[in-house]
Image (cartoon, rainbow, N blue to C red):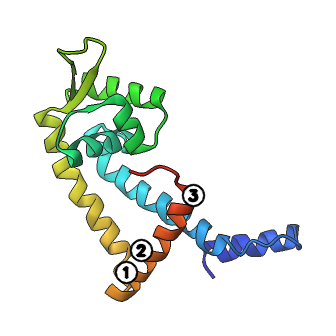
Amino acid sequence: MDYVERVREQWAEQLPGLDTSAAEVTARLRRISGLLDAQVDAVLADREVTRPELDVLAALRRTGRPLRAGEVTTMTGAPGASITKRLDRLERAGLVARTVLERDRRGVVVELTDAGRALVDDVFPHQVALEHRALADLSDADRATLARLLAVVLRRVDPADH
């Protein structure tokens, strides 16, 4: 019996008429995500960067170009105020630089510094390896099926087109 089965069993005792069958998927997704996040946090611990800050750095790295703060907000799904705080912290740490656009003095773009790029290039492969280990017991066909089914669910709950 795994964690989710125990939780469903407890809910069945407390609220016997409640259908918790969706938790077979959703609670497992949350549990897996939380456990993987904790493992990434451990990789980041000595680098003085949080996982949400890594999300910002990774968004900048994978696009390969400077971004407006609003674009970072859209790409990470984090609130604008949180992105501003993360960018402030990352700028102080020398991992990103902000530049005022010449043509529009109100516009500011954010880009990775060499140190920020190096950090992402060092840490991201660790994250990918953790994800591969999590899926190691699935065949390629099972992984493809799972990915396809999760994409259906994601399209249902995520209105944004990233």
Q: Secondary structure at mark 3?
A: helix
Left or right: where does residue 44 sit relative to residue 150? left
Q: Is residue 160 visible?
A: yes
Disc 3 + disc 1, Cβ < 8 Å: no
Residue furthest toward the top? Answer: 105
Q: CA distance from mark 2 to mark 1?
A: 5 Å
For marks 3 and 2 on the same chain, the one whose residue lies earlier in the sequence? 2
Instruction: Where is residue 21? Give x, y as percent.
Output: 71, 75
Q: Which mark is residue 144?
A: 1
Instruction: Where is residue 1? Give x, y as percent.
Output: 63, 82
Question: Which residue is drawn at the image coordinates 35% and 37% (left, top)?
Answer: 72
Residue tagged by mark 3? Answer: 157
Q: Is residue 105 above or below residue 44?
A: above
Question: Which residue is drawn at the image coordinates 19% and 43% (left, top)?
Answer: 119
Question: Which residue is drawn at the image coordinates 18% and 38% (left, top)?
Answer: 65
Q: Is residue 87 above or below residue 156?
A: above
Q: Is residue 109 above or below residue 40?
A: above
Q: Amino acid at mark 3?
A: Val
Q: CA distance from mark 3 to mark 2?
A: 15 Å
Instruction: Where is residue 103? Give x, y as percent.
Output: 19, 15
Q: Which mark is residue 147?
A: 2
